[in-house]
Image (spheres, grey):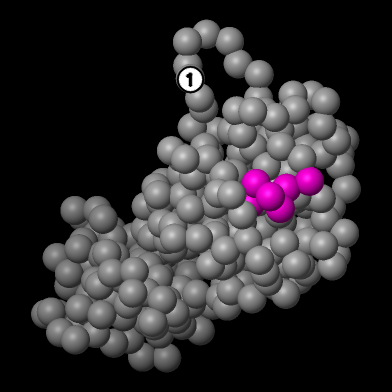
Amino acid sequence: MSDLRITRENARFQQWEALLTNRSKRHRNREFLVQGVRPITRAVEEGWTVRALLRADGATSTWSDALWSTTDAERVLLSPDLHARLSGREEGAELVAVVEMPEDGVTRLEDSRRPHGPVVVFDRPTSPGNIGTLARSADAFGASALVVTGHAADPYDPQSVRASTGSLFALTVLRVPGPGPVVEHAHAHGYRIVGTDEEGSALADVDLTGRLVVVVGNETHGLSSGWRTACDEIVSIPMVGTASSLNAAVAGSIVLHDALRQRG
């Protein structure tokens, strides 16, 4: 496969640069940018479709050389200054991957590589970084999927992908407009739905074994009324000290860790 070389800003480059900041274009084109060694490596290892690899002309490393020589994706050499604008690094030394965005249908929840792990729902998160942080914990504690519901930040925003340090690619990732499709799927497949909130049963007293959906609410407003109604149980995390609440991603991480402990 021959390499495409781009030395000055053109329509193709502008399309890729728009993926950094323009959510609508990401989802219209069903693709997003992945920066960095570990995230790109995880995307490839987990079988996500890489549409293109973008490399600074003249740059080389053992890792990037190996991936460049074995990829089936389009290979594009960019001038160093153009590559730096996409890579987030002034030297633009590593690859940037253009990765295909998967479909959002809830039927994909049954195709997870971790069919026995919890499904994590993040309800209307406003911070892409929090989505990435929760994805990282979901991966670490054996969850099968991350579902972002409602009017929310984008799980494919570069901040989310970076914060996940590649863990996003180990999960089945979905976006759905509201609780309905996930709740129907949960009821049809024998899941219990457990929400997190300041008012609820103590975490230590709640059974988190079996097929489980863990719902984490919005950073400021908590669970929506729709999710609160759908939950079989609400769990709270005991705290001491002066903190009024926990970061949403941190709270979700604690519940997922306890679910892992209970599963043994």
First to last magenta residue range: 227-232
179 lies above or below 239: below
Q: Residue at x 19, y 53 (%)?
A: 90
- To which quarter of the image does residue 203 belong? top right
**Viewer-proximal residue, 150 or 228?**
228
Q: Can you say which quadrant of the picture contains the C terminus?
A: top right
**Viewer-proximal residue, 119 or 15?**
119
Q: Residue at x 48, y 68 (%)?
A: 66
**Viewer-proximal residue, 109 or 88?**
109
The extreme left residue here reads 8
43 on left or right of 264: left
Residue 170, image x and y in percent?
A: 63, 58
156 on left or right of 224: left
The extreme top residue here reads 241
Mark count: 1
To which residue does mark 1 refer?
244
Q: Residue at x 19, y 86 (%)?
A: 11
79 lies above or below 38: below
The extreme bottom residue here reads 1
215 on left or right of 63: right
Q: Is residue 42 magenta?
A: no
Q: Can you say which quadrant of the picture contains the N terminus?
A: bottom left
- To which quarter of the image does residue 62 belong? bottom left
Residue 192, image x and y in percent?
A: 81, 50
Residue 184, image x and y in percent?
A: 75, 67
Kindly report the secondary structure that dominates the magenta region of the rendered protein.
helix
**Viewer-proximal residue, 56 or 177?**
177
Q: Amino acid at mark 1?
A: Ser
